[in-house]
Image (cartoon, grey):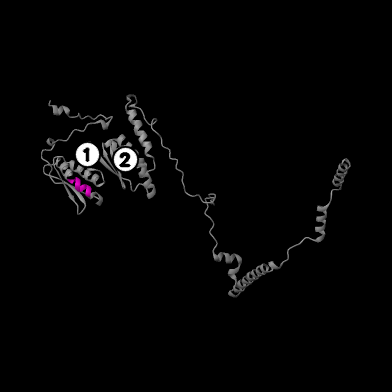
Amino acid sequence: MSDSESEEPKQTNEPIENAWAMKIPAFKPEDNPNGLVEESSFATLFPKYREKYLKEVWPLVQQTVAEYHLKAELDLIEGSMVVKTTRKTWDPYIIIKARDMIKLMARSVPFEQAKRVLQDEIGCDIIKIGNLVRKKEKFVKRRQRLIGPNGATLKSIELLTDCYVLVQGNTVSALGPYKGLQQVRDIVIDTMNNVHPIYNIKALMIKRELMKDPKLANEDWSRFLPKFKNKNISKRKQPKVKKQKKEYTPFPPAQPESKIDKQLASGEYFLSKEQKQQRKQEERNAKQSEAAKKQEEKRQKDFIPPTEDSPARKRSADGDDNKLDVKALKAKLAKANKKMKKA
């Protein structure tokens, strides 16, 4: 038995406990000696502000891509980057990796980081966050919450997930191991759905510590993880006057009376045209007379003299107020006489 055969993983039908721990065998040129049948190419557009940087870095891009037997072209007129396979290309998936690399570079990821995607164990994920929040103000606040003060939150996410994360415009570009990319996506989507990233960061830190303890390998970790309770109360303005709901009845409401029904009930329907006109005229006259009375009352209001109290009542009231307390006056005079005698 040769060494190459012994290195290959054994194929079993048993369930795998930890799929992330599996080692994927490397794809070598010997595995595909005939190369590719047809040429494949991918193109991506880049914004105007990236033109200067890409122009400077493009020789390095071509050099890196040439190691995998690929070609790279930069079209400054159309504003696009193109990657193509050649006759010497032996890895069929490397063109997909190269496509991801130019996509990341178009999304403002520096070339030093973007070229890591060409490695087998490194992947990338471009998360679209522009359509997750309706209001622009809320979107800007939540995006800033993801970055944190001086980029502290973003740096902690990078350290815990082993991924490079860049927030740019309406997208979040992540680059790193596949397990880390999954965690980054969960954090980003939760943040845009108004769950603070600190909860997910704490959960990742706790999980990292729990992984070190072999006793907790087969136990449920949910009791150790922080639980998030949404305390947001609806800020919708409540109406001042709330309409009370009517009691439910299985019977439909009575049909409203039409104009003809009202005329039949009052007997007006059976009157002739002259009688109807006469009744209308009487109603008008009654209304006019009422209005005239009200108007006359308003005019005469200023000429009505105010009510005054009678003089007899006034005198009696003044007499009550001016009554003297005779006993108190006698006591004062007696005191004054005593003082005079002593003197």
Q: What is the x, y in percent for residue 74? A: 18, 49
The answer to whether marks 1 and 2 mark residues whose Cβ atoms lie closer than 8 Å is no
Q: Amino acid at mark 2?
A: Arg
Specify the segment rendered in magenta.
Answer: 52-58
Q: What is the x, y in percent for residue 333? A: 87, 46
The crowding category of the residue bearing disc 1, from other C-alpha atoms within 10 Å (few below 14, some 14 to 19, many at least 20), is some
Question: Which of marks 2 and 1 precedes in the sequence?
Answer: 1
Query: In the displayed structure, would residue 232 be above or below residue 203?
Result: below
Task: Tell me which residue sits at (89%, 42%) in the image.
Answer: 341
Quadrant containing the N terminus in the rendered view: top left
Q: Amino acid at mark 1?
A: Arg
| Disc 2 target residue | 185
Instruction: Name the image quarter holding residue 67.
Output: top left
Name the outermost residue toward the front: 343
Quadrant containing the C terminus in the rendered view: top right
Instruction: Name the image quarter holding residue 270.
Output: bottom right
Residue 148 in sight in this render: no
Task: Tell me which residue sits at (59%, 74%) in the image.
Answer: 277
The overriding secondary structure of the stretch rendered in magenta is helix
| Disc 1 target residue | 116
Task: Tell me which residue sits at (18%, 41%) in the image.
Answer: 94
Please tell me whether mark 2 sits on a helix, a strand or a loop: helix
Please tell me whether mark 1 sits on a helix, a strand or a loop: helix
